[in-house]
Image (tube, rainbow, N blue to C red):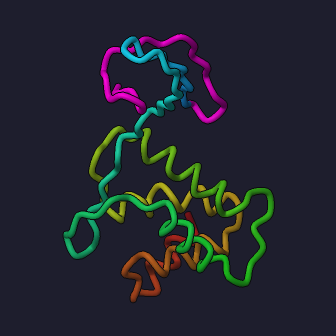
Amino acid sequence: MKCVFCGSTDNKVVDSRYLKDSSIRRRRKCLNCGMKFTTYETVEKSPLVVLNVFNEREPFKFEKLLESINTAAYCRDLVGKTSEEICSEIEKKLLALKKQEITTSEIVDVALPIIKEVEPMVALVYFTQHTDCQDYNKIRIFINR
C-alpha cells in the first residue's frame, strides 16, 4: 500500500474496523512521512461468466437479470418479495453452484423455481421469454410442474 502523501510503501495499520457491507476500513500511518490515511478493503466476489445462446462469454450482470424479471412482471404485482430480492436470491444460488462459467439455461433453471414461488404467472412469462417454447406441450409441461 503506497502512502497517498509521499508514495512510500513503508506503513503500518493503526486501526481496523469491519463495516456492514463486508468491507474493512483501515487507518494507516506512513513510517516515512508520519501522515495517516484511510483505506477500504472489500472481498471480490468470484466473477460469474455467462455463456449465452450464441456461445459468447460475457460477465454476469445483475442489472440484466433484474430487467428481465421486471419485464416478465410488467403487469403483475410481486407479492412478498421485490424483484431486487428475487435477483439477489438467484445470484446467491448461482454462486452456490461454485462454477465460474454458467449458461443462460442454467440461469433460467435456477430462476424459475424462485420466481414461481413468488408469482406463478411471472414465472410462466419468464419461461416463455427465455426458452425455445414454440411447442405448446413444453408450456403445458412447465405449468404442470
Nearest to the observer: residue 6 or residue 1: 6
Image vertical order of residue 37 relative to residue 135, above or below = above
Whether the magenta-drawn stretch holds residue 18 is answered as yes
Whether the magenta-drawn stretch holds residue 114 is answered as no
Where residue 75 sits: x, y (%)? 73, 84
Where residue 118 sits: x, y (%)? 70, 60
Furthest-left residue in this view: 55
Span of residues in magenta: 1-22
What residue lies at 52% left-to-right and 78% top-to-bottom? Answer: 140
Quarter of the rendering containing residue 132: bottom left
Image vertical order of residue 76 relative to residue 103, above or below = below
What residue lies at 74% left-to-right and 57% top-to-bottom? Answer: 81
Where residue 139 sits: x, y (%)? 50, 79
Nearest to the observer: residue 75 or residue 17: 17
Image vertical order of residue 34 relative to residue 50, above or below = above
Q: Is residue 46 left or right of residue 65?
A: left
Quarter of the rendering containing residue 49: bottom left
What residue lies at 57% left-to-right and 57% top-to-bottom? Answer: 87
What residue lies at 41% left-to-right and 32% top-to-bottom? Answer: 4
